[in-house]
Image (spheres, rainbow, N blue to C red):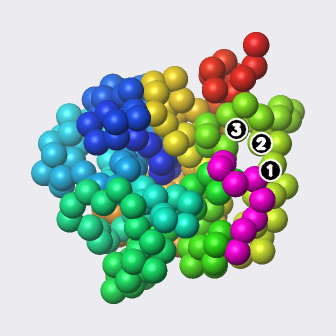
Amino acid sequence: MRIDCHFHTSLHSCCSFVSPQKACEIAISRGLDALLFTEHGVYWDQDRLDALQSNYPKLKLYSGIEIALTEGYHIVAFGTRFLDRHVPLLSLSDLNRLVAPERDNTFLFVAHAFRYQPDPTPELEHILGWCDGMEMRSINILRNHAVASPTKFLSADHALYEHSLQAHNLIPLYNSDGHDEDIIGLISNELPGVTPPVDEVALAHLFKSSHPTEFQDRERLARHDLLGFP
């Protein structure tokens, strides 16, 4: 299974330029098996997600959520839903309280941990200690300081991400953090021999027990405007 676990659409995220329909069409054309919508502060309505799913049977669709924390970091969650309305900002303690009743059925990962703060902070260390995973690659991790290796692009601060991942024994994730059409399918998680789980809770269980590898379309990624290459 090839899945992107961090993607935004124009339906619910004002910063995105991609309609859900266009996202699905491009995802299928570029080899994704599944796509997790992670809108800012809100889940998709399940009926609306089901209606979209019926039009794209070749692509399994899920809804998660990206939460902005008052501590200055972002967490992506999928599994059991814990909000029934749009929430633009939460403290870590409030998020912990909401997630706690279904913590075993919820997967949490830190998105672009060093995007806004280039060094570890006590707040980040506390957040990482509470999460299941850490996003290691995305367009917003690579933007303007990507380093080309023989097989893929890394961020200039990759060693910092790797140290935090190992220090907290976290599961690595590789996502587009997509807001535009060009990034769809270029960075994703690969889980060989796995079919897309039936729902978000099953997906959370799968990621809690797996270590995905990275798929990267290096040729297309090199042409993306946000990498800053001429």
Residue at the spot 81% in from the left edge and 49% down from the top edge: 157
Q: Which disc is residue 158 wearing? A: 1
Q: Is residue 7 visible?
A: yes
Tell whether label 1 touches label 2 (CB within 8 Å): yes
State the separation of the CA atoms marked 3 and 2.
5 Å
- Is 110 situated left or right of 86 in this image? right
Q: Secondary structure at mark 1?
A: helix
Sequence-wise, the earlier of marks 3 and 2 is: 3
| Residue drawn at 72 percent across, 23 percent down | 228
Q: Reply above or below: 60 against 169.
A: above
Spatial distance from mark 2 to mark 1, Cα to Cα? Answer: 5 Å
Q: Quadrant of residue 197?
A: bottom left
Decide whether the magenta segment is chiefly helix, strand or loop: loop
Stretch in magenta: 115-122
**Classed neighbour count for the residue bearing mark 1: other residues with Cα under 10 Å, few (<14), some (14–19), many (≥20):** some
Image position of 209 (left or right of 80): right
Q: How many neighbours does mark 3 have within 10 angstroms: few (below 14), some (14-19), or many (20 or more)?
A: many
Q: Residue at x 54, y 29 (%)?
A: 183
Residue at which label 2 appears: 155
The picture places residue 127, in percent across and down from the top left corner, at 59, 73
Q: Which mark is residue 142?
A: 3
Task: Tell me the quadrant of the picture where the C terminus can be found.
Answer: top right
- Residue 93: x percent and y percent? 45, 80
Lower sequence index among marks 1 and 3: 3
Q: Is residue 121 magenta?
A: yes
In the picture as drawn, the residue positioned furthest to the bottom comes out as 101
The residue sitting at the top extreme is: 230
Which residue type carries mark 2? Ser
96 in relation to 2, above or below: below
